Amino acid sequence: MAVGWRVWCVPAVAALALALLFVACRFPSASAFRRKEMVLSEKVSQLMDWASKRAVIRMNGDKFRRFVKGSPKNYSVIVMFTALEPHRQCLVCRQADEEFHILANSWRYSNAFTNKIFFAMVDFDDGSDVFQMLNMNSAPTFMNFPAKGKPKQSDTYELQVRGFSAEQIARWIADRTDVNIRIIRPANYAGPLMLGLLLAVIGGLVYLRRSNLDFLFNKTGWAFAALCFVLAMTSGQMWNHIRGPPYAHKNPHTGQVNYIHGSSQAQFVAETHIVLLFTPTCLPCHNLTFYFSHSLKRLDCLLLFLVLLFFPFLGR
């Protein structure tokens, strides 16, 4: 009986030991859990300290690997990869940087500000190893690094399609993180001043011509103003105002500047200027006889020739 008991007991003890070993490996100990919580608390505390000083945290390769890619992490990080140094000659990067700072400051001074999301930037000259790690060859680029898991394709912002205005990026962030940011822009008095100047000029002209106001009923003048408005709208100026696209795109590797966007769903500001300049060439010359002189019609034909000659090369 003793031998039989031993034969039965040894496998049971071995099975129990294996079960305890599995549980120990599968579930971390209390000390390991506390250590993980301590590391997470230190990371969040450091990020909050940086965010209290600057809305956009500037990172190099080491900071990026620790605070953005490394675990543990219970927060999302919106990172702008850019190249702001003057010798990079990235005009779009500077424009996007201004909008990104407006977005980050709007979140920093918001009543809903929490440690759920942070804003950071990696400059190519500070973290070229990060660009290589992510196989990134263009700037600026916006990416969302979620609190859990790896970034998906939708976590990369479609800059060429949506533009880089703070409002557009805020909508994308709301889709990816469920964090709604109300954009607060610095006061800009240029618009009211220009409107006031325009009204003053119009008022001055009306006052000087108060004895003869026939020019207000001039059909040619109103037709020309309506034509300018139509050309401005059909060339895409309103789309530029809403989307905020870059003026042009410069390839960071070849240095070549493209003025025509390669996609049918986006455009550059330069492209709308080209369309605005050459749209009158689509109007028949005999319809312009009432408004333009013979010399201007010659110029119109010259512009049409330039369109046919140079337009195929603008997007290359």
Image (tube, rainbow, N blue to C red):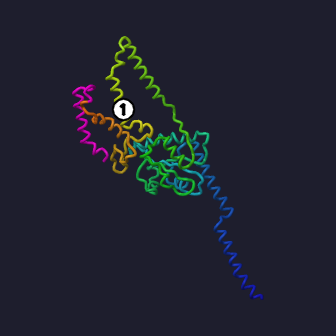
Position in image of residue 148 (x %, y %): 57, 56
The residue at the point 51 percent across, 39 percent down is: 102
State the image coordinates of residue 9 (x, y, percent, origin top left): 73, 82
Instruction: Point out residue 150 in the picture as x, y percentages from the top left corner.
Output: 52, 57
Verify whether residue 310 appears in magenta. Answer: yes
Q: Percent x, y for residue 271?
A: 35, 40
Main SS of residues in magenta = helix
The answer to which of 58 and 210 lies nearer the viewer is 210
* Residue found at the far top of this picture: 211
Which of these two is toward me, 178 or 92?
Answer: 178
Up the image or down, 153 lies above or below 223; here it is below
Comparing 153 with 280, the one in front is 280
Q: Is residue 191 left or right of residue 28?
A: left
Give the labeled residue for mark 1. Answer: 230
Q: Is residue 125 magenta?
A: no
Q: Is residue 9 above or below residue 111?
A: below
Q: Say whether residue 120 is left or right of residue 216.
A: right
> Is residue 288 or residue 241 the one in the foreground?
288
What's the residue at 47%, 26% (across, down)? 192
* Residue type at numbered disc 1: Val
In the rendered structure, which segment of residues is drawn in magenta?
287-316
Circle 1 Cα neighbour tier, 10 Å, few/some/many (<14 / 14–19 / ≥20): few
